[in-house]
Image (cartoon, coloured by chain):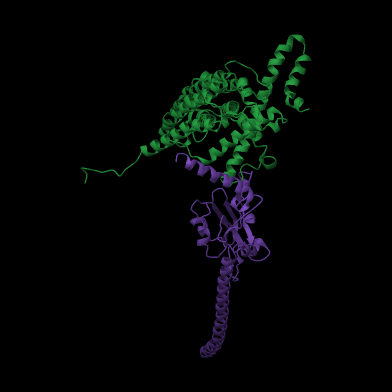
Chain colours: A green, B purple
Amino acid sequence: MTQGLDQIFVTFQHWAVAHSPAILQRAVSIVLPVVGLLILFPSLFAITTVLERKGLARMQNRYGPNRVGPYGWLQPLADAVKSLTKEDIVPRKADKLVHFLAPVLLVTVVFLEYAVVPVGRNMVLADMDSGVLFFFAAGAATEMSVFMAGWSSRNKYSLLGAMRAVAQMISYEAPLILSSIAVVMAAGSLSTVTIVERQAGYSGIWPHWYVLTPWGLAGFVLFTIAMTAESNRSPFDLPEGESEIIAGYFTEYSGFKFALFFLGEYLEMFAVSGMAVTLFLGGWAAPFSFLTWIPSWIWFMGKVMALIAGFIWVRGTLPRLRMDQLMNFAWKFMLPMTLMVIFSAGLWRFLPSGVARWLICAAPIALLYVVLGRVLQSERKIEKRVYRYAE
Amino acid sequence: MLGEGILKGLAETARNFFGSYWGKERLTTVQFPEERLPQAEAARVFPFLVYDTDDWEKGLRCVACKICEVECPPKCISIEKSTEKKPDYVGKPQFFPAIFDIDVSVCMSCQICVEVCPFEAIKMDTVFELSTDDRFGGLHWDKERLAKPNSYYHKIHPTESAAVDADLAEKKAKAEAAHSAAAAKAAATAATAARTGSVEMGAQEKEAKAHS
C-alpha cells in the first residue's frame, strides 16, 4: 500500500506507456513526466503568491488578500486574468526580438533546471552523471536572459538593473557552487540521484542528511543565502530596487511578459530550493526512520515548502542591502566561509566518526565565522570629520 | 556577534506572524464595507440644503441670495432665482431657488458655502460614498436630491445643529417681538392719525363754511 502510493506516479507513467500505441511509447514516456512538472510547479507558484502575500501581511499585522474567493484563495486567478488582459507594450526603440525572447528564455531555462531535481523515489526526469553541474549551468543561463531584458529595453533603468543583477548573480554563484562542492566531495558523485541515496540511510532513527554534519550545516546556511541572492529575493532584490531603478531589468515589461518574469523568478526559487533539499536535506528521504511510510514525493514537496516559508520569513524581516554591502558580503564573507566548509568536509572524510570528529570539523568554521564577523564589523568606523583649514 | 541582529529580527517577525492569529487586537485593519468606524461629528463631505417642515419644496430655508454661488471657489453651485415670493421662517416674503444644482465632481468640500450662508440653509453632509456609474446626471445633483430635513441635520451633527436652531429661534423671537412692536406702533400711529384726521376734518369744515 505505502509502496504503491510512493510509486503512484511512476506506476501511472508505466501504465500510460503500456496503453499507448507502440510508435508513441517513447514520446509518452518522455513527455508525461515533463507535463506533470509543467503543471505542478506553476500551480505551486500560484499558491505561493497567495501564501507569501498572506504571510507577509500577518508579519506586518495586516490581513492580506481576502476578497477574491473564500479567504482570498482565488487571488492568483484574478491576477492571471488581469495580466493576460493587460496591454503588451514594447518600447518603440527596443530590440523587439530580444525583448520578446528574454522572458521566454528565462522560463525555459528555469524549467531545464527541474530535469535533474529528484522529486521522489525513482522520480527524476534525467538521471545525469553530472546532474549538479547541469543544474548550475542552466541556472547561470538565467543571467543571460536578465541581461537580454535589460539591454533590449533601451532604458537606462533597465540596463542599470540588468547590470546590477548580473553582477550580483555572478558574485553569488561562486559561493553557491562552492558550498555544493562540499556535498559532491562527501557523496563522491555529481549525480543528484546518488547524492540523495547517500543520505537516505538511518543510524537508529536519525537520518544521514548532510545538514546534520558541521560542514553540512554551515554549507546549507551559505547555500540558502547564496540562493536567495541568486533568485533575486529580498534582502538581495537590488536588481529591482524600486526606490532607485523603478523595477530594474523588467521596467519596460508589461502584461503577460511581466507575469512570465514573475513566474521565472518563483520557479527559480523553487528550483534552487529543490536543489538545497537534494544536496543538504536528504531530498525525498524521510527525516526519521519510522516516518518512511509517508510517500517520498510528499517529503520532498514538504521540505521545499518549508524552505519557501523561510524565504518569505526572511523577506518579511530584512531590509534591502546596499550594493557595496552586497558585494562585500559575497566576496569577503561568503567566499572564505565556503572555502572553509570545503576544508572541513575534507577533514570529515578522513577522521574516524564520533563526537570528536564533529567538534574538530566545527571548530575551524566557527573560528572563521567569529574572526570574519569581528573584522568585517570593525572595518568601517565613521569618525567625526575634522576640518583642519576651515575653522 | 555577526548575525545576532538578523536572528532578533526574525524572532520579531515570527512573534508578529503568530500573534496576529492569536490576538485580534494586533490587527488594526478595519474590513471596510462590512465594518465601519464611527465618523467624527465634524466630518464633512458634500453640502446639502436644509428644510424645516415636512414638505421639502416649501420648507427650504434657501432664499436664492446667491452668496454661496459667488463665494464657491470651484464654482460648482448654480442657482436660479424664482419670480414669485414665499414666506420664510420669520414670515417675511422671500425668493426661493427655482433651480439649485451642485456638481459633485467639482465640489471640493471646503465648507465655504456653509460659512457664508446667512440663512443657515446649506450644511455639510457626512455621506461619502458618492461614486456612480452615471457620469453626468449622477454627479449633478438638483435641489430635490440636495434637500434633507432638519431632523437629519440633527442626527449627523447634533451639537452644531442645536446651536443653529437656538440661534434661529432667537432671531425668530426677536423678529416676532419687533413685528409685534411694529404692529403696536402702527396701531398707535393709526389711532393718533385718526384723531388728528378728525381735527383736520373739523378745520376743513370750518374753511368750507367760511367759503360759503
> Across the whole image, how many numbered discs are drawn on residues?
0
Q: In the figure, residue B57 lies in which quadrant?
A: bottom right
Residue A165 in the figure: left or right of residue B126: left
* Residue A281, x across and y down, in percent: 60, 29
Which of the pair A196/A58 is nearer the observer?
A196
Residue found farthest to the top: A23
Is residue A100 among what the camera can see? no
* Image quadrant where one finds the N terminus of chain A: top right
Q: Is residue B210 above or below residue A75?
A: below
Which residue: 50% across, 21% down?
A144
Q: Is residue B93 above or below residue A81?
A: below
* Residue B36, x across and y down, in percent: 63, 54
Which of the pair B119/A298 is nearer the observer?
A298
Residue B190 in the figure: left or right of residue A371: right
* Residue A219, x across and y down, in percent: 52, 29
Q: In the figure, residue B189 lies in which quadrant?
A: bottom right
Q: Is residue B68 above or below residue A117?
A: below
Q: Is residue B178 above or below residue B34?
A: below
Is residue A51 among what the camera can see? yes
Which of the pair A203/A65 is nearer the observer?
A203
* Residue B46, x across and y down, in percent: 57, 55
Which residue: 65% across, 20% down?
A124
